[in-house]
Image (cartoon, rainbow, N blue to C red):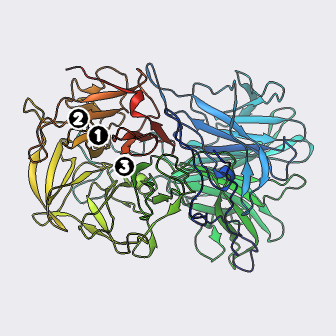
Amino acid sequence: MKRILIYAAAALMAAASCGKTPVAEPGTEPVSVDGTAPKSGGILTATLSGGLAPLSFTKTISNNCIGYAYLSGGEMPDLFFQCPGGVPSSNGISSYLGLNLCEFKGWAPSGEPLYGAPVPVTPVPWENSTAILRIVQTSDRIIAFTVSSSKLRYAVYDAATRSFGSSWESASISLAAVAGTPMAIDIVPGAGGSAELVILTTDIEGSYRPPMDDVSESYYDSAGIYRGQMYYGRIYRCNIDLSSWKMQGSPSLISGDSPVVLAPVGIGAFKDSSSGADGYLCVNKLGVVKYVSRKSATVSAYALDSRGEALVNPFVSGAVLPLRSRTGTDTPWTVISGEGSPRVVKSCGRTSSEGVPVFEGPYEILMENGDLYAGSLPVPTVADWNGDGALDIVAGNSEGRLLFFRNYGTNAAPAFGRAEYLTSDGEEICFRAGYYEVQGPFEAAWGYLCPVVFDWDGDGVKDIVFSGNEGKFEFMRGEGTVKNPSLGRRQGIFLDGLELYGMWRVRPAVARVGGKVLIAMMDAQDALHLYQQTTVTTVKDLGKAVLSDGKYIYGHRATASSTLGERGREKLEFVDWDGDGDLDLLVGTPLQASVPDPSYGLPWSRTTRGLQTMWLENTGSNDNMVFAYPRQFLFRGADFHIGTHANGPTACMLGNTSDGRPNLLVSGEGGKFFFFDRSDLTELSLW
């Protein structure tokens, strides 16, 4: 393969008050380049722009930046990321909160900070437990802190062994005066070995979720109002001595009775001497970034972007970390992270008339020699989106966004560009349910977009058929041309005047058979259900799909969960997998899957967790589909675990397809695309 070194166009300019904005411009690469054949069992890598890609971590649930230190001598600090593992162990989900260190490498040609590949840091004291963490560099040490059982504990970093050891040390500091449940902490080193300890807590005890007595019970009452507790954050602070490990005064509630932010998850001390801003940045589960001034701590307001609008993180947030400059106390850059690739914002050096700081961004942190990255829980479909003859990848993700990875190479040797965000009716796609969501309003910022590229209206231009966290099946009509596609507004698909509705987070299977269009989804009983298009916006009911013995095909385990949220989540696709001319069905299974029966289906009956890819052979015909019992794919004779929530398989004609049959591309929750040559796949069935 010829090494490609192609960079994006020059960075754009932001508002004059903020100077240059470091923004890469995906989609500006040349018409064609030399790619490389995908490696079976491997992850699709970023080929263009010198292999630049968003900083990402493999097989993780979220990517929280919890600390930094100037170790490599760069202009920006190196970053510590806590990355919960998403791969099942033999007796359940691994709780290992993997710690990774990313070294600052410089600046990308387009202006973003550039970091090296994650390097594991091990051992760590929190290896097998959930912990609230902050890693801080003082004048002589790098220290990890945690709050546990009303106590502050710590561990010191050993650069020679690249570890924090295997046990915590306890500080002589009692946090009994702190009310509520701690959600996040920050430590701000000061002069003479002192430091400020900041704690963000919630104002409730126990769970914010309502009691659930039955598997079918909703989080909402008959009026559609959430039955759980709406919880808010409060801020406590105190001074501590890092030499004697004693407290200098009791922790005080500085936010008073005023709530700081709904559903708090992160806090970081922010300071900008040029603007006079000095306070705390708080983030919540829904991507909100708020600022609390030290001078008026009882008032919180949205942090602002350079346009004067509320700074809303483009993905679900989990942590906020202002980065102190090497020589001072100011924090010009701030990392915001959680699900998705971590971003940075930069202080504009000014505040609003109300004293609220203004930021540039957020912008992605990049890495060299990275993988293609589509955000958390991507759901891909492979199609020639722009009509140039090369197969591209179009994927939805947990943010509710629709991404386009342009193939500048060939089908045999693809070369994918960085993600481009697609638009609908002129607006960047970000479909989210809002307040009324299957698992409650605290998931309002998740969209779980599950798309299929398909010519739904039969005009020769590709459309998008999709579902997501609302459980509705909809489409966006392709309104451009084959070579210059664009998407119109979202439109509903209706059955007898009602929206076509089923289980949430399901990618529908859609196919044109002769002169008719079929769509399959998981219905209200979490059973595979078939419909036929009658007009562009309507379908007729063909009934539940059946096995060869006449039984229905379900997708959930008998005791899957105490809520409806664990139902659905399957990713379906029609494809002639065995080349016999009939459309078969691929099924990507979620964590609690048991296909085709809740009691004895695959993969649950033979593994401790779901998350596999199934093939259901069509033993009938395209006009009368009847499916064989599922066969689970194995890669070189073994299960392939690439995550824990759900996966997204799609058949594709990428790589070696000399026999005319497709290979398999499967997405994991960590945002990566795993390629499997069909010659390496075998099938396992229990019936």
Q: Residue furthest front?
A: 658
Q: Residue furthest right?
A: 192
Residue located 38% across and 75% down the image: 480
In the image, 303 versus 220, the foreground residue is: 303
Quadrant that contains the N terminus? top right
Q: Position of residue 617 (x, y in %)?
A: 21, 34
Mark 1–mark 2 Cα distance, whole angstroms, equals 6 Å
Q: Amino acid at mark 3?
A: Gly
Q: Mark 2 highlights which residue?
A: 616
Q: Is residue 367 left or right of residue 245?
A: left
Q: Mark 1 highlights which residue?
A: 586
In the image, 540 versus 453, the foreground residue is: 453
Secondary structure under badge 1?
strand
Residue 253 visible somewhere in the drawing: no
Q: Is residue 567 left or right of residue 550?
A: right
Q: Position of residue 645 (x, y in %)?
A: 41, 38
Q: Is residue 324 above or below residue 91?
A: below
In the image, 223 versus 480, the foreground residue is: 480
Asked if the residue at tag 2 contacts the one at tag 1, i.e. Cβ–Cβ closer than 8 Å, the answer is yes
Q: Is residue 18 above or below residue 147?
A: below
Q: Position of residue 356 (x, y in %)?
A: 68, 71
Query: In the image, which is nearer the foreground, mark 2 or mark 3?
Result: 2
Residue located 51% across and 45% down the image: 671
Q: Amino acid at mark 2?
A: Leu
Q: Position of residue 136 (x, y in %)?
A: 78, 41
Q: Mark 3 highlights which residue?
A: 228
Secondary structure under badge 3?
loop
Q: Earlier in the sequence, mark 2 or mark 3?
A: 3
Q: Amino acid at mark 1?
A: Leu
